[in-house]
Amino acid sequence: MRTLGAWDVTAGQTPTKLDPEAGVSEEQLETWIHADPTMLGNDVHWVSRQLVLSDRTRLDLLGLMPDDTWVVAELKAGPPTADAVRQALHYVMVIASMTTVDLITSIRANPWFTPAVDARLAALPDGDDGSRDFRIIVAGVGDGSGAERRSEEHTSELQSLAYLVC
């Protein structure tokens, strides 16, 4: 499991790792990752943030990889938990049920929408055959051992859910 580190970097001083009690907010993590996608992977192009989905839930970050795999990122100010994994799976199921046109319309209506994203969205295939691929990233400040332990306990349940949404 990858861990996300937050650091205070002040010119001329040694970087200091921030712990959850230091007040790193989910919004800060989201802003940093949106501005620098390499924090969670080199191949992700973030196309939306704080996207309100058709069921009125709101996901943190939505991205696309070069192979048109959708990336759902759920961020937590503390350690990632099993609930965060379930939350991300819920977002995947909602997005999987949307047509590409509806999803792109939602992205374009988002207050965070930027015109630079439009070219990436326009390049998506037109068909809606239900064969979208997804990648889930759950990140936070902390070791995430609770999420890892919980996912190990429910591996077959998560695999079943993943199978349903793929």
Image (spheres, rainbow, N blue to C red):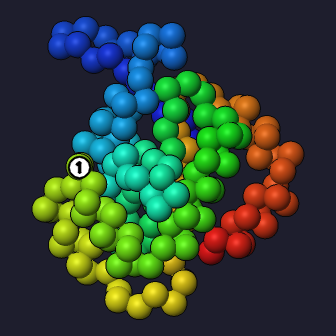
Number of marks: 1
- Where on the picture, by quarter, is residue 107? bottom left
Q: From the image, which quarter does the C terminus lie in?
A: bottom right
What percent of the width, then of the height, locates residue 143?
62, 28
86 and 159: which is toward the camera: 86
152 and 76: which is toward the camera: 76
Q: Mark 1 points at which residue?
A: 111
Which residue occupies 35% across, 86% down? Answer: 125
Which residue occupies 55% across, 64% down? Answer: 94
Which residue occupies 36% across, 37% down? Answer: 30
State the SS at label 1. loop
- Give the residue at the far left of this rendering: 115
Image vertical order of residue 160 relative to residue 79, above or below: below
Q: Is residue 46 something one can see in this rendering?
A: no
63 and 11: which is toward the camera: 63
Q: From the image, which quarter does the N terminus lie in?
A: top right
What percent of the width, then of the height, locates residue 150?
79, 40
Image vertical order of residue 119 relative to residue 63, above or below: below
Neighbourhood count class around disc 1 (C-alpha, 10 Å): few under 14, some 14–19, many 20 upward: few
162 and 41: which is toward the camera: 162
In the image, is 155 to the left or to the right of 139?
A: right
Image vertical order of residue 133 relative to residue 129, above or below: above
Which residue occupies 18% across, 13% down? Answer: 11
Residue type, numbered disc 1? Pro
What percent of the width, then of the height, locates residue 165?
64, 71
